[in-house]
Amino acid sequence: LAKISKLAKLRISDTQVDSFMDSMNRIFDWIDQLSQIDVPEMNETAVDATMSATERTDVPLINNTRDELMSNTKHEKFGLFCTPKIVE
């Protein structure tokens, strides 16, 4: 627990150690139960190579005009957004 808490950068007080150890032991018991499940017909991957992904058409939902977009800024020149110079 000390090593795990150090790796996770957690501060665990001496009064919390028993509670954390109990929780961790329950997690490890659950993992143990999962490893005992017999799944002989399961493949490593759940995706069938013959399946194809469903595709949808790319339809824009919002059609903003330049005037609508430029109305959101005070700093505009020649129809473009103006920003402070950041490179000298």
Image (tube, helix red, strand yellow):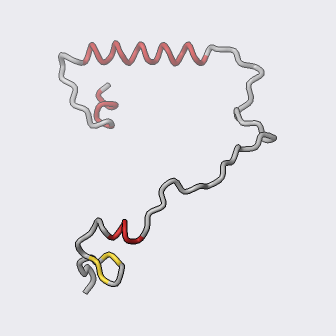
Q: Is residue 29 left or right of residue 50?
A: left
Above or below residue 78? Residue 75 is above
- Give residue 1's position: percent from left, percent from top: 32, 25
The residue nearer to you, when weighing 24 against 2, is 24
Q: Quadrant of residue 24?
A: top left
Place residue 75 in its image quadrant. bottom left
35 and 14: which is toward the camera: 35
Q: Quadrant of residue 86?
A: bottom left
User: Is residue 8 or residue 48 the one in the foreground?
Assistant: 48
Can you say whether 64 is above or below 82 in the image? above
Where in the figure is residue 23, as x and y percent of width and height? 35, 15
Position in image of residue 51 (x %, y %) = 77, 40
Left or right placement of residue 24 versus residue 43 in this view = left
Task: State the residue at coordinates (43%, 67%).
Answer: 65
Quadrant where the image shows the C terminus: bottom left
Residue 38 located left or right of residue 29? right
Furthest-bottom residue in view? 88
- Nearer to the camera, 33 or 49: 49
Residue 46 place in picture, x, y as percent: 70, 32
Q: Residue at x 27, y 37 (%)?
A: 9
Numbered marks: total: 0
Q: Where is 55 relative to 85, above or below?
A: above
Q: Is residue 44 left or right of residue 65?
A: right
Which residue is the extreme one toward the right?
50
Going 44% across and 63% down the picture, which residue do you hit? 64
Give the residue displayed 37% in from the left and 71% down from the top.
67
